[in-house]
Image (spheres, rainbow, N blue to C red):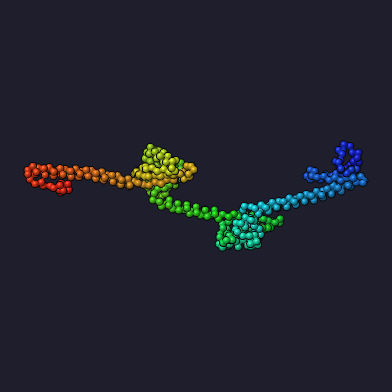
Amino acid sequence: MVHNDYENLPGKNGLPEGHAGVSREMVVPVVRNKKVVAILGIGNKPANYTDLDVETVTFLADIGWELAEQKMKQELLIQSEERFARLFERAPLGYQSLDENGNLIEINEAWAKTLGYSKKEVIGKWFGDFLQADYVEHFRERFPQFKQAGKVHSEFKMTHRDGMPRDITFDGQIGYKNDGSFEKTHCILQDVTEQRLMEKKLRESEEKMRSIFRVAPTGIGVVSDGKFMEVNPSFCEMTGYSKEELIGRGTRLLYAAQEEYDRIGKEIYRQIAQKGFGTQETSWQKKEGSSINVILSETVIDSNGHSNGFTFNALDITERKKAEMELKRKMDELEKFNRIMVGRENKMIELKLEINELLSKMNLSRKYNPQQITDGS
């Protein structure tokens, strides 16, 4: 847009206070993707503006915009790199980069804190120098595979600066140059030492519980929704059923009567609601039809609810019940015999007293003295 007679330009809005006077002006747009992104204006040329001036200023405007745009991109790149550097250093997980030989060329603060080293002690060193001895060859073999595959998920035992081993997981990718050749690795690491220790303790605890479960002399199992989910060998021996015959079947299987099944369930659940576990004495029917007496105890697996089922312990007290009944029978016999014996002794005392009385009436000496009357002789 060219105005060589600005003074007589119709419809002009005038100039701001203090602005230099304008006799001529030329304004050219900078267009990118069919949109005006900037304008460049000049004014007060001694002579009229020509087409050559328009062409020249348009060219300068384009050059100026390219330079300005490049400058803005550089500033944005610098800002982006600064933000990345801050994120890189403050990231909660460790980060490292290796060159094509496996030497460390970058680590962040979290990496240094995790393993106790300073950056000065690490940069330029071979990564294998920070591994436990058993893992050095493993890294030597895996690193070429990592470079070939382009990504990796792995776990190593690394050596902390204090000499203690640390379990470290790695997730990494290869960074490439513009020509597609290897540039460096990008790896995120996480210290999972405590997690692995907890997992080990959990495995040991589970194995200990499994061994107890296998060899316990009492029946042990798990029920859920009224069905057997797990039983131990002692429970199978107690009931006569195999594990395969019990798993998935309802616990009603062991009760001869529905009334007893309902009573036990109602009472045990009532006790569990009150004190966390329930115990009841009942009778079960074995596979071959005979009955056994058991003390059944149950508790919930998860104290927050019944959704995970119940564990139970069943103690076969059949022989004990038989022994109790036999003991009662013997005690009853003894009581009966005792009553008979006490009656006999009282009768003998009575007879001795009568004999002494008759002898006295006959003016004869008494046969039994007081000691002989009471001692049964």
For residue 357, above or below residue 111: above
Check the image and name the residue furthest to the right.
47
Q: Position of residue 105 (x, y in %)?
A: 66, 59
For residue 100, above or below residue 332: below
Front position in the image: 164 or 228: 164
Total marks in image: 0
Image quadrant in which you'd find residue 363? top left
**Image quadrant in which the N terminus is located:** top right
Residue ID at (42%, 45%):
312
Front position in the image: 190 or 355: 355
Q: Position of residue 239 (x, y in %)?
A: 38, 46
Please state if 84 lies on the left or on the right of 326 as rendered.
Answer: right
Residue ID at (45%, 51%):
209
Residue ID at (60%, 58%):
115
Q: Is residue 265 visible?
A: no
Q: Is residue 178 visible?
A: yes
For residue 123, above or below residue 231: below
For residue 13, above or below residue 314: above
Residue ID at (48%, 42%):
305
Q: Position of residue 31 (x, y in %)?
A: 80, 45
Q: Position of residue 254 (x, y in %)?
A: 39, 42
Image quadrant in which you'd find residue 165? bottom right
